[in-house]
Every structure is written in C-alpha cells, then in structure tokens.
Image: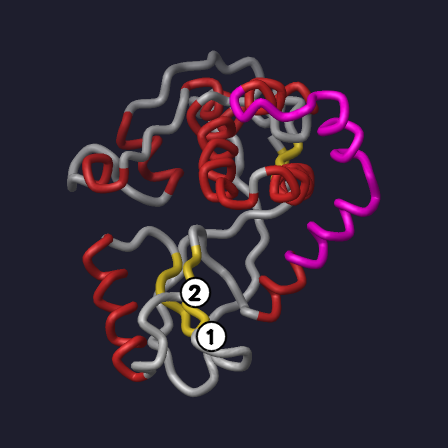
Amino acid sequence: AQWASQNPPGAFGEGGGEGTNEFGDFSGGMGGWDDGGGEGGSERILNQDEIDSLLGFDLSGDGSEDRTGIRFGTDFLWHIFNPEKSDWVLSSEKPAIALSVFKDYLPEQQLDFATDLQLALNAEGRDLCDDEAYRHLVKKYRLPEAEFYARLHDETYKEKANYEFGLCRQLKVSGFPALFLQVSEQMIYSVASGFTERELVLQRIDSVLAQHPQHQSPI
C-alpha cells in the first residue's frame, strides 16, 4: 500500500487568541514488514506487540481498545504490512469528494457517513479509491445510485473537496480526528486533535463557552 497522505494524532493546542494553534501538516508512509529473511523469506502472521509497534499505540495492554473501540481489520492490515503485494494507493481525495456529494443529499448525517468511510477502510479493508467501495453506503443511505456516481466524478465536487482541504490547512489540522468550536466568524477554538476522551472534550467546550457566554452551543 502506498500512502498519499497520513495524518498522525497530534496534541491538543490550548485555545487562545483568535482560534487555532500548534498544528502542522504531516505526510509520510508506513513501510512493509517481513521476517528478516530478505529475498525469499517466508510470510508470517504479526503478533499483537508488532502490530501495536507499527501502528504507534498499544491496543491490548493499556485499555486503548476498550476506550476507543479501535480494531483494525485483517484485510486493512494485510495491505499495510505487505506494500510490495498491495495495489492500494491510499488517498483522502475520493472519500472527501464522496463526502462532499453526500452533504448535498443528507447534510444532517454527514458525520455518520464520515464514520462509515473510516469503518469501510480501517475495519472492513475497502479501497476508498475504488468506486465500488461506496456502493454499500449508497444503498444504506438510499441515495440515487447513478446520480451519486456521476457526481463522484464531477469536477464541481472535486473542487468542493479541495476547498475543504484548504480550510484544514488554514486551521493547521495535523491530527485525526480533529474538533473545533466556532464562536464567531473570526474566532475558532481547537477542542481536540487525535483521540480525546469524551469527558475532556466536554470540559474544553465548557471552558470555551464560559469565555463566550453569548454562545451556549457550537455554531
């Protein structure tokens, strides 16, 4: 699998001034894994410690899996750990376009759709650069299939997706997921970047709203 872009979790930047803080763009890749046998070496199944090491966190020993619900699917991991055999090129562009299309149909469910995209990739091992990866979601949300796929290849929606990428760059987003709270047209606070406990997110939202009592809920 080749990684077109990768956004590792970043630290939360404490809110201040007019919005966002210590974010930077990241790009990079994950290398493959073999058993050290070099050319002709045999494949083997990775143990949990090796998977945790490559992914950058422990899903088994410290309760992370219980806290986050993260479980990477075997198909996804196969492509990540066998890049020389995989035909995947992981890119954010097509899923971002798909989300832009979806928002024209069911904007109030865009977070549900974005979550389904992550599950499709990381849990189910679907290639999000492949049009077929979206067919089950088209059916789930009862979208007009032919129209959805026409829009998926429409330059208008590609431009919309690239516009939102530009907004992310302006906000200096470096972690996934990222959460912001906008209290005015000029003031946006970073609430979380990377996995953050629900209680801590709520504390940060309350702290921001306490500074802006005229806003009792996010804009």
The amino acid type of the residue labelled 2 equals: Phe
- Callout 1 environment at 10 Å: few (<14), some (14 to 19), or many (20+)? many
Spot occupied by residue 48 in the image (x, y as percentages of width and height): 28, 27
Task: Establish if 42 lies above or below 80.
Answer: above
Residue under pointer 2: 180
Q: How many marks?
A: 2
Count residues near mark 2 (Cα–Cα under 10 Å), then give few for <14, some for 14-19, many for 20+: some
Snapshot colouring: secondary structure
- The residue that appears at 71% across and 58% down in the rendered structure is 163
Q: Quadrant of the N terminus?
A: top right
Decide if residue 185 is on the left or right side of residue 9: right
- Classify 140 as above or below 66: above
- Prevalent SS, magenta region: helix
Q: Secondary structure at mark 2?
A: strand
Q: Earlier in the sequence, mark 1 or mark 2?
A: 2
Q: Is 90 inside the magenta-drawn segment?
A: no
Front position in the image: 53 or 177: 177
Q: Quadrant of residue 171?
A: bottom right
What amino acid type is highlighted by mark number 1?
A: Ile
* Highlighted magenta segment, given as a residue range: 140-164
Q: List the single residue furthest toward the right.
A: 155
Q: Quadrant of the C terminus?
A: bottom left
Give yes or no for residue 151 being in the magenta stretch: yes
- The circle on residue 188 is 1
Q: Is residue 70 left or right of residue 168?
A: left
Give the structural element (helix, strand or loop) at label 1: strand
Q: Position of residue 69 (x, y in %)?
A: 27, 34
Q: CA distance from mark 1 to mark 2?
A: 7 Å
Instruction: Choose between 189 and 122: the one closer to the eye.
Output: 189
What number is the disc on residue 131? Answer: none
The residue depicted at 31 percent of the width and 36 percent of the height is: 52
| Residues at marks 1 and 2 touching, judged by CB atoms closer than 8 Å | yes
